[in-house]
């Protein structure tokens, strides 16, 4: 059993960008799977992944601040 757990693929959950206000990125659809300090990857239009950190929560929406440039991130981007 220990070996089976070790080999299991990690569970990945996805949300979508619902708003971008300056450097604040709203990600919805995580269904309470994010907490303060959670790190997510947001996919930009040019194929980059921008790492962000959840700094606030409201309902099923995570309010995130990026570790890099937000250029190319749009509404509906996968996070």
Image: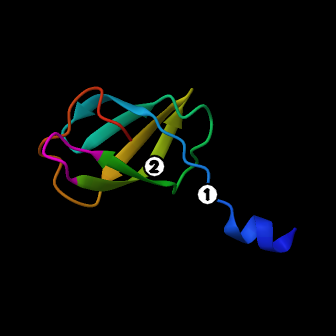
Judge the density around disc 2: few (<14), some (14-19), many (≥20) Cα neighbours within 10 Å: many
Is 71 located above or below residue 78 in the figure?
A: below
Residue 30 position within the rendered picture, expressed as x and y whole percent measured from the top left? 54, 35
What element does badge 1 sit on? loop
Q: Percent x, y for residue 16?
A: 39, 31
Q: Quadrant of residue 6?
A: bottom right
Pinpoint residue 54: horizontal percent, then vertical percent. Answer: 45, 49
Taking the spot 32% from the left edge, 46% from the top edge, the residue there is: 42
| 48, 59: nearer the viewer | 48
Residue at x-position 77% and y-position 65%: 5
Q: Mark 2 and mark 1 in contact (Cβ < 8 Å)?
A: no
Image position of 18 (left or right of 10) = left
- Figure quadrant of residue 17: top left
Look at the picture and state if 14 lies above or below 66.
above
Q: Can you tell which mark lies on residue 10?
A: 1
Residue 54's label in the rendered image is 2
Mark 1 closeness class: few <14, some 14–19, many ≥20 residues within 10 Å: few
Task: Identify the residue at horizontal 60%, vertical 31% (top origin).
Answer: 31
Residue 5 lies within the magenta run:
no
Residue 12 on image: x %, y % = 55, 48
- The answer for how far apart the CA atoms under marks 1 and 2 are is 20 Å
Residue at 30%, 27% (x, y): give it: 76
Location of the N terminus by quadrant is: bottom right
Viewer-side label of 1, 2: 1
Quarter of the rendering occupied by the C terminus = top left
Examine the rendered structure and indicate whether residue 5 appears above or below residue 47.
below
Question: Can you name the residue that lies furthest to the right here?
Answer: 1
Please tell me whether mark 2 sits on a helix, a strand or a loop. Answer: strand
Q: Which residues are magenta?
A: 43-48
């Amino acid at each position: 059993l220990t070996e089976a757990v070790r080999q299991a693929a990690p569970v990945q959950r996805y949300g979508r960008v619902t708003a971008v206000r300056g450097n604040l990125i709203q990600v919805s659809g995580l269904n309470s799977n994010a907490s303060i300090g959670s790190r997510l990857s947001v996919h930009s239009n040019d194929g980059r992944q921008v790492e962000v950190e959840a700094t606030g929560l409201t309902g099923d929406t995570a309010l995130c601040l990026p570790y890099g440039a937000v250029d190319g991130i749009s509404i509906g981007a996968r996070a």
